[in-house]
Image (spheres, grey):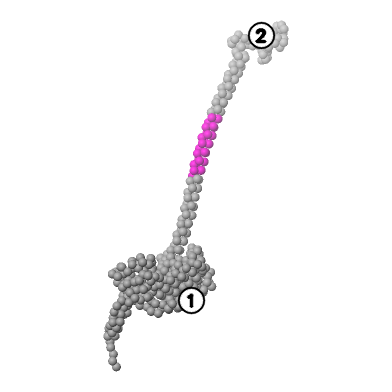
């Protein structure tokens, strides 16, 4: 038995390819993945699909080196009016290469810009236009996202790294928000992915009252791996679903039809988790702001009431002080008037007493005696009429300097 080494085999294959394809060759293919590196090189994945089933018939790697890519990309984009991206069906001039270590690849040297949109992009465009004609593109977006999206139905593969990233992000969040998650397992790539995801949606629909949102997540991958998310039936089910759907599919460069019809589209499963956390944080902040506003209102009300009470107390004190001053002034006036009245009464009465004393004095016996008058009495009773005496009565006469006794001889009426 004869044998050859692996390197001998690869060398023979390389020689055969060089002899067979010794000049550039124009081929038709669809760009399913495109990546630019910092050095300016472009790395692609080219595919060919069956027109009836979308099954991939061929797939290979391709490169456009930086010196060619710097001219080819602006030439293509200026000629077609669209970006050079995945999803395009292109006609390119290639050198066929084979390397013993790196395998088969194509080195793109030129591109025909008249070969426009590829089959994948045309199919996507057709689906988008059909959804727009049906009027359902924005239907899911019109649903209100709950303020506390904590009950989450997740459609993903249980073994997918994207699901693990999503779960870990929720659990490791320092805010420690509580999320109730339920995984509805589905195939997330390949021919069965579309029907599997729709079946998961139907299962969630039967328990729709138990959830706030639906999350569909998958990690990044080649564009061909994400083809199931460009399905009309899947987009139709998502657009009309009664709960908001949050999509986190693929990497930054991937935008699927599901992303277009979902309520919210984010680039990674981790970004979806961060979005849910931020939604709760926003609600928490709003609640804290409301509580703070209520506290401020209460504090302001207390301060206002306190100021009012203090001002009222001061006004009462001022009123009482004014009243006391007024009443004191009134009492002092009344006291002064009373004192004045009493003094006037005392003076008046004193004057009366003086007059009485004067009157008494002028009518007293001693006053009369001092002025030359005499007082005559009989048996101690003053005689004011001759009719009070008769002959033989003993009478006593008082003068200013003494008295004397005499006998009535004959009264002379």
SS type, badge 2? strand
Q: Which residue is mark 1?
A: 195
Residue matched to label 2: 406
Q: Residues within 10 Å of mark 1 (few under 14, many from 20)?
A: some
Q: Is residue 246 among what the camera can see?
A: no
Report the predominant secondary structure element of the magenta stretch. helix
**Earlier-in-chain disc, 1 versus 2:** 1
Residue 404: % across, % down? 63, 10
Q: Residue at x 47, y 53 (%)?
A: 296
Q: Position of residue 197 (x, y in %)?
A: 47, 74
Q: Is residue 359 left or right of residue 155?
A: right
**Measuring 59% from the left and 22% from the top, which residue is drawn there?**
349
Apparent side of residue 370 relative to residue 201 in the rendered image (left or right) = right
Tell me if 394 is positioned left or right of 73 in this view: right
Residue 319 lies in the magenta-colored region: yes
How packed mark 2 is, by other alpha carbons closer than 10 Å (few <14, some 14-19, many 20 or more), is few
Give the quadrant of residue 190. bottom left
Residue located 32% across and 72% down the image? 110
On-image quarter of the C terminus: top right
In the picture, measured across the screen, residue 329 lies left or right of residue 389, that is left
- The image position of residue 60, as x and y in percent, is 35, 77
Q: Secondary structure at mark 1?
A: helix
Report the mark closest to the observer, 1 or 2: 1
Residue 279, magenta (yes or no): no
C-alpha distance separating marks 1 and 2: 172 Å
Q: Magenta stretch: give its range.
A: 310-335
On the image, the x and y values in percent for residue 377 come to 66, 12
Quadrant in which the N terminus appears: bottom left
């Amino acid at each position: 038995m004869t044998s050859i080494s692996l390197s001998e085999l690869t060398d023979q294959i390389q020689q055969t390819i060089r002899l067979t394809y010794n000049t550039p060759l124009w081929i038709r293919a669809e760009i399913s993945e495109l990546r630019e590196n910092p050095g300016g090189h472009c790395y692609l994945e080219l595919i060919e699909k069956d027109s009836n089933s979308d099954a991939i018939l061929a797939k290979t790697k391709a490169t456009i080196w930086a010196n060619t890519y710097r001219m080819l990309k602006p030439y293509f984009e200026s000629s077609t009016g669209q970006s050079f991206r995945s999803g395009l069906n292109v006609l390119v001039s290639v050198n066929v290469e084979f390397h013993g270590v790196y395998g088969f690849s194509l080195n793109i040297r030129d591109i025909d810009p008249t070969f426009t949109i590829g089959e994948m992009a045309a199919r996507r465009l057709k689906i988008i236009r059909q959804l727009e004609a049906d009027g359902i593109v924005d239907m899911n977006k019109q649903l209100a996202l709950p303020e506390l999206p904590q009950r989450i139905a997740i459609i993903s593969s249980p073994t997918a790294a994207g699901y693990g990233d999503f779960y870990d992000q929720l659990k490791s969040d320092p805010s420690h928000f509580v999320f109730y998650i339920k995984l509805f397992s589905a195939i997330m790539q390949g021919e069965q992915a579309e029907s599997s995801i729709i079946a998961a949606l139907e299962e969630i629909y039967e328990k729709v009252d138990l959830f706030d949102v639906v999350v569909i997540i998958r990690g990044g991958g080649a564009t061909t791996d994400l083809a199931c998310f460009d399905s009309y039936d899947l987009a139709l089910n998502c657009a009309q679903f009664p709960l908001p759907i949050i999509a986190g599919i693929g990497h930054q460069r991937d935008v699927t039809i599901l992303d277009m019809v979902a309520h919210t589209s984010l680039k990674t499963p981790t970004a979806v988790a961060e979005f849910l956390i931020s939604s709760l944080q926003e609600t928490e902040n709003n609640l804290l702001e409301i509580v703070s506003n209520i506290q401020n209102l209460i504090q302001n009300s207390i301060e206002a009431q306190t100021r009012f009470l203090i001002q009222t107390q001061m006004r009462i004190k001022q009123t009482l002080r004014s009243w006391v001053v007024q009443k004191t002034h009134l009492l002092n006036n009344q006291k002064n008037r009373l004192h004045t009245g009493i003094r006037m009464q005392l003076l008046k009465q004193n004057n009366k007493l003086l007059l009485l004393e004067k009157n008494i004095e002028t009518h007293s016996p001693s006053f009369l005696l001092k002025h030359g008058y005499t007082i005559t009495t009989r048996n101690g009773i003053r005689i004011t009429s001759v009719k009070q005496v008769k002959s033989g009565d003993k009478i006593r006469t008082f003068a200013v300097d003494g008295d004397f006794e005499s006998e009535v001889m004959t009264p002379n009426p």
